[in-house]
Image (cartoon, rainbow, N blue to C red):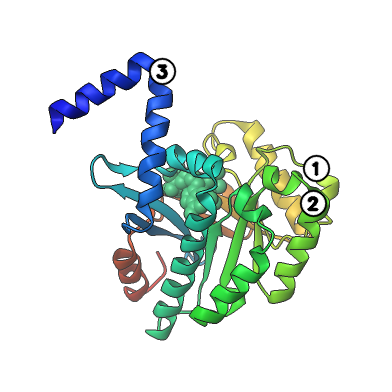
Amino acid sequence: AKEKGRNNFQFFTSEMNAHAFERMTMETWLRKALERQEFALHYQPQVDIGSHRIVGMEALLRWNQPDVGMIPPVQFIPVAEDTGLIVPIGEWVLLEACSQNKAWQDEGLPHLRVAVNMSGRQFRQKNLVEVISSILKKTGLEPECLELEITESIAMVNADETVTKLHALKAMGIRISMDDFGTGHSSLSYLKQFPIDTLKIDKSFVQDLTRDSTDNTIAAAIAAMARGLKMKIITEGVETEEQLTCLKGMQQGDVQGYYFSHPLPPGEFAALLRGGQPL
Ligand code: C2E
Ligand code: CA
Ligand code: CA
Ligand code: CA
């Protein structure tokens, strides 16, 4: 089988470049991954910056492809997006995240919010509001316990449509956060029209926080703006005590990052919740 695989590879590379080959293979695999149950969600805690208590979690998609092992989301999500497969995959993510969160609540664990990443194509889906509403109904999760993460680039594609859609989602009680804030083509004038609950400060502003005064200034300015707009803040990518100390000096809100925990498989995340807090 190995020999045949190699021949196949040579055949394809003589006809097209290696990139196209990889893409085709991945697309074929990706089409089967849902029915073969190769996806899983890992959960990363979001903690209150003052108390270090877990207040929420971000669901992060993992693909365990049997032949090659773990494929990171940055590699397959663009392919899923281009092929449209992101729509059924994204729906699976929503259903899984909501039903897992509800199962933990039913077990007596604290009612937390679970944040789910939206892709552009998924967000622009005509019936997104209905899909989410039916998932909430099916799982019994309170809408307040679901947070959707969109990015500035997703929001700005058709800003008027985004405003309408976000209002419909907000009316259901769902929370909205602006992911990777500060890295996209943000339009601050639109920010006040989008009904956003949370600004998620991108990890690129955290990395050099203690050394680079420019990043300090930017992170502090975003925090001040969020306060003014009555939005919450989550800072992601917090890896060191130094970064955390620096953030504590300038903002309230929540933090997320390897300093507290890597994204964990459900069993380990539940153990973290049961183990008592704060982290
Ligand atoms: P993101 O939404 O910005 O997610 C945060 C990423 O930062 C995650 O990578 C997470 O593991 C990583 N991270 C967390 N803490 C730290 C830290 O302290 N330092 C550093 N350097 N990184 C940290 P991951 O899981 O590989 O996901 C990458 C991206 O893939 C996500 O970026 C998101 O854009 C996308 N993604 C993940 N799951 C989904 C999903 O279910 N649907 C969609 N549409 N996109 C997803
Ligand atoms: Ca995210
Ligand atoms: Ca992010
Ligand atoms: Ca991102």
Q: Quadrant of the C terminus?
A: bottom left
Q: Secondary structure at mark 1?
A: loop
Please name whichever residue, 70 or 133, is drawn nearer the observer in this view of the structure: 133
Q: Is mark 1 within 8 Å of ligand 4?
A: no
Calculate the distance from the C-alpha at mark 1 to the C-alpha at mark 2: 7 Å
> Where residue 86 sits in the image (x, y, percent)?
52, 50
Query: CB at mark 3 closer than 8 A to ligand 1?
Result: no
Report x, y in % for residue 111. Answer: 50, 79
* Amino acid type indicated by mark 1: Ser
Which residue lies under the disc numbered 1? 187
Closer to us: mark 3 or mark 2?
3
Q: Quadrant of residue 143?
A: bottom right
Badge 2 marks a residue whose secondary structure is helix
Instruction: Evaluate if marks 1 and 2 touch, with contact meaning CB atoms under 8 Å apart.
Output: yes
Residue at which label 2 appears: 191
User: Helix, strand, or loop for circle 3?
Assistant: loop
Badge 3 amino acid:
Asn
Instruction: Decide which of tag 3 and tag 1 comes sooner along the chain.
Output: 3
Q: Residues within 10 Å of mark 3 (few under 14, many from 20)?
A: few
**Residue 108: x %, y % from top left:** 40, 85
Residue name at image x 57 percent, y 80 percent: 142
Contact, mark 3 vs mark 2 (Cβ under 8 Å): no
- Within 10 Å of disc 2 (Cα), the crowding (few <14, some 14-19, many 20+) is some
Any mark on residue 17, and which? 3
